Image (tube, rainbow, N blue to C red):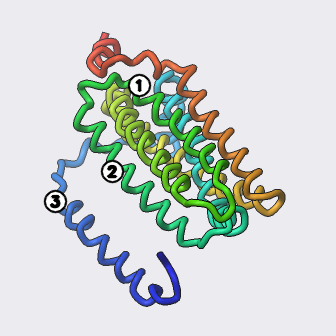
Amino acid sequence: MISAETLGWIFVAATVATLPALWAVAGLPRYAPGRPNDQGPLRRIADGGHFVLGNGYLRAIAGCALFWNFAFSALLVTMVPLVTDAFLMEPGIFGIAMACFGLAAFAGSGIAARYAGRIRPNLLLLFGPASSVPAVLLLLTVAPGGSPFAIYAAFFGLGFGPAMWLIAQNSVRQIVSPRDMLGRVNAMIQTTIYGARPLGALCGGFLVAATAPRDALAFIAGCFALSFAVAAISRLRTIRSYGDLAAAEAA
């Protein structure tokens, strides 16, 4: 937890922790550059957006990611006033909750990778956003001055299912996107993800200032529900295996 005693070394420790990541990146394979594209960057971005919007799978992935990341960023802004003012707990509780989120992401990614051939993709693509809704609603049950374990469980739920969803949707992206369009498709999805985050943070901050942390939390739960709704009504729910999807795309 960050405190007056830890400020002297916490950022140094965080910097040192990035060294294994740099070492891992340095070991990635190197590929020969592809044929240069004569199109300008704006035209390529427009082509990528047009392709994503025109494909039912990619359109659903983008919509699901948009609402989920908007809601998650709004939640992060809301959590400190929620913990301190509504739950009457120490702000360091939020740091532990984020650690639970990270551990859950590792666990969800590991399970998705290990059992990818045994779990139908549509289950992962629906479970990820669906599990976020009860996880956030769990925060509404926390009593002032009570136990923080519900907070930890909520953030574990927010990390576990969505990490599995992230792996599954990446597989779908690679299958349904032509090789020459994959980079542009990935760029559009990433733009959707990272573009939604500052908007969610601004909205979360405005709601906390204008209403109360618990009211903001109810709005955030609704945004997570929209993320699930996008996936539930889309073609993502029909993907029973990656092999069948690849065969259908090749036909």
Q: Is residue 153 toward the left or the right of residue 182 in the image?
A: right
Q: Is residue 43 toward the left or the right of residue 137 in the image?
A: left
The answer to whether residue 41 is seen in the rendering is no
At label 2, counting other C-alpha atoms closer than 10 Å, the crowd grade (few under 14, some 14-19, many 20 or more) is: some
At label 3, counting other C-alpha atoms closer than 10 Å, the crowd grade (few under 14, some 14-19, many 20 or more) is: few
Q: Which residue is mark 2?
A: 106
Q: Is residue 132 toward the left or the right of residue 22 in the image?
A: right
Residue drawn 72% across and 67% down? 85
In the image, 93 versus 71, the foreground residue is 93
Residue drawn 44% across and 54% down? 101
The answer to whether residue 210 is seen in the rendering is yes
Q: Is residue 98 above or below residue 250?
A: below
Residue drawn 45% across and 85% down? 6
Residue 179: x %, y % from top left: 31, 32
Which of label 3 and label 1 is nearer to you? 1
Q: Is residue 110 above or below residue 27?
A: above
Please say if the residues under marks 1 and 2 sit with CB atoms less than 8 Å apart. Answer: no
